[in-house]
Amino acid sequence: EEGVAGGGRPLLGFSHFRFERDNEDDKFDPILYVYEIHVSDAARRSGLGKRLMTIMELIAVRYKIRRVVLTVFKSNISAMQFYLNKMKYGVDHSSPSKYGEETDYEILSKVVCKK
């Protein structure tokens, strides 16, 4: 059934990520890229989004991956505030805005593991 997790409980949230290589100055550093994070309306403002992102960061640390990277639409003000203010992400060096390009999204990242 759509929207139902195991045991018949409603699905409150999920994340989709994968490990990738980032080409930064001709070095290929592994990154954890968060492709999607969804929190149901019923679970918003409950701390679930922060918990999901913390898990993403812990996975990166566990595998000695230096940065977590994600893309967020600029029009999604609450998501931008969440990542920039609550989760302490910053605009990534690869974001088009760093090069003066006008886009409807921003690439954000956070260093979670020192090399």
Image: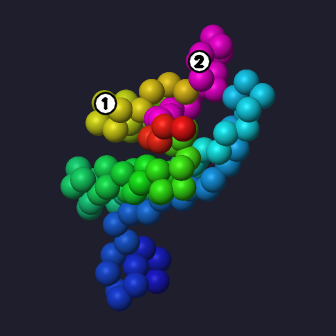
Gap between marks 1 and 2 measured at Cα? 19 Å
Residue 53 position in % (x across, y down): 39, 50
Residue 92 visible from this viewpoint: yes
Please name the amino acid that badge 1 sits on: Asn
| Residue 99 falls inside the magenta stretch | yes
Image-based side of 85 in relation to 61, left or right: left
Which quadrant of the view contains residue 85? Answer: top left
Question: Considering only vertical position in the picture, is 20 above or below 16?
Answer: above
Residue 19 position in % (x across, y down): 63, 53
Residue at mark 2 = 97
Which quadrant of the view contains residue 38? Answer: bottom left
Residue at image position (70%, 44%) is: 21
The mark nearer the N terminus, 1 or 2, is 1
Image-based side of 103 in relation to 36, left or right: right
Residue density around tag 2, few if under 14, some if 14–19, many if 20 or more, within 10 Å: some
Q: Residue furthest left?
A: 46
